[in-house]
Amino acid sequence: MDLTGLTGTNAYCDKAAAAELRKVVREESIGLVRFIGSGNYHYLSCFFLEQVKEPCSLVICDHHTDMLPARFPELLSCGCWVKRALDECPNIREVLIVGAREDLICAIEKKYRSRVFCYSDKRIGGSDDWMPFALSHVHYPAYLSLDKDVFTTAAVDTNWDQGSLTLEQFQKITSCLFNRQTVLGVDICGENPRADQKKNNDFNRILLRYLEDENKPLSMAV
């Protein structure tokens, strides 16, 4: 998808841009691995999730919960898209957020806490109970949304504050998911045009190879 000419999209998506994006997304297959650019555009996941036609679990690897109250209610943003998806996509039955900051987890509104389950950045480094946690909270075919800011800066450079997840930990976490649930689709954001492009492109290739090998029906969007 080439959307470089579309305005009203950077971090906040206005209604006109949202209408155009929905038209494009409707023509795409859900079962793809998509690289969607900077974390400023993570809200694109919301449009992909609108295309899911069955009950699903949304699994998000992100250093942020993206569940902040909307600063401008008429706009969709990278900071509130998960909350909007829960409100407007009835097929999302549960959300699992991996690698988020604990202060942002504590700020999640109480009304969502029966459907949103978090495995914090701190917990990744200090515990080995991921598998029972995932088995307890992922009960449906899964859609995986990855913001690379969840990873350590040694692995990749993004334009947001970053977590401490390593590639090996990510592989361990997602292999558990792939082995137990159908994966409906994957999107990946976190590009940084000011960073070392070779480092980030090499990391993208590793991610794509791993995701396609683990979940054979998926292919890269072009």
Image: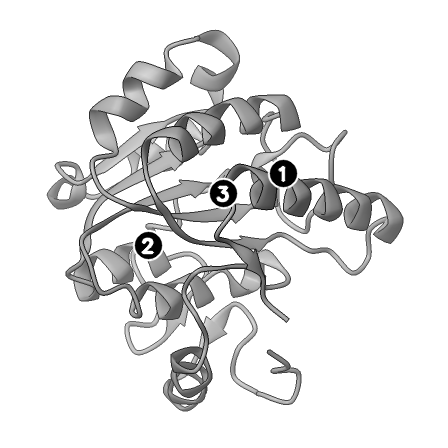
Q: Secondary structure at mark 1?
A: helix
* Residue 164 image-quadrant placement: top right
Q: What's the CA distance linking mark 2 and mark 3? A: 24 Å
Q: Residue at x 64, y 89 (%)?
A: 5
Query: In the displayed structure, does residue 156 sit left or right of residue 127?
Result: right
Sequence-wise, the earlier of marks 1 and 2 is 2
Task: Kindly identify which residue carries mark 3.
Answer: 215
Q: Residues within 10 Å of mark 2 (few under 14, many from 20)?
A: many
- Left or right: residue 101 versus residue 182 is right
Q: Nearer the viewer, mark 2 or mark 3?
A: 3
Of 168 and 164, nearer the camera is: 168
Tell me the quarter of the image containing the C terminus: bottom right
Instruction: Tell me which corner region of the image, top left, top right, bottom left or bottom right, holds residue 1.
Output: bottom right
Q: Which residue is mark 2?
A: 82
**How far is disc 1 from disc 3 in space, using C-alphas?**
9 Å
Mark 3 is on which residue type?
Asn
Quick check: can you spot residue 40?
Answer: yes
Among numbered discs 2 and 3, the one appearing first in the sequence: 2
122 is higher (above) or lower (below) than 29: above
Of residue 167 and residue 65, the one placed in the foreground of this image is 167
Q: Quadrant of residue 108?
A: top left
Q: Is residue 140 above or below residue 28?
A: above
The answer to whether residue 48 is left or right of residue 187 is: left
**Pair 1/2: label in front:** 1
Seen at 61% across and 36% down, the residue is: 162
Label 3 environment density (alpha carbons within 10 Å; few <14, some 14–19, many ≥20) = some
For mark 1, what is the residue? 210
Residue 157: in sight, yes or no?
no
**SS at circle 3:** loop
Badge 1 density bin: few <14, some 14–19, many ≥20, Cα 10 Å: few
Q: Position of residue 148 (x, y in %)?
A: 61, 44
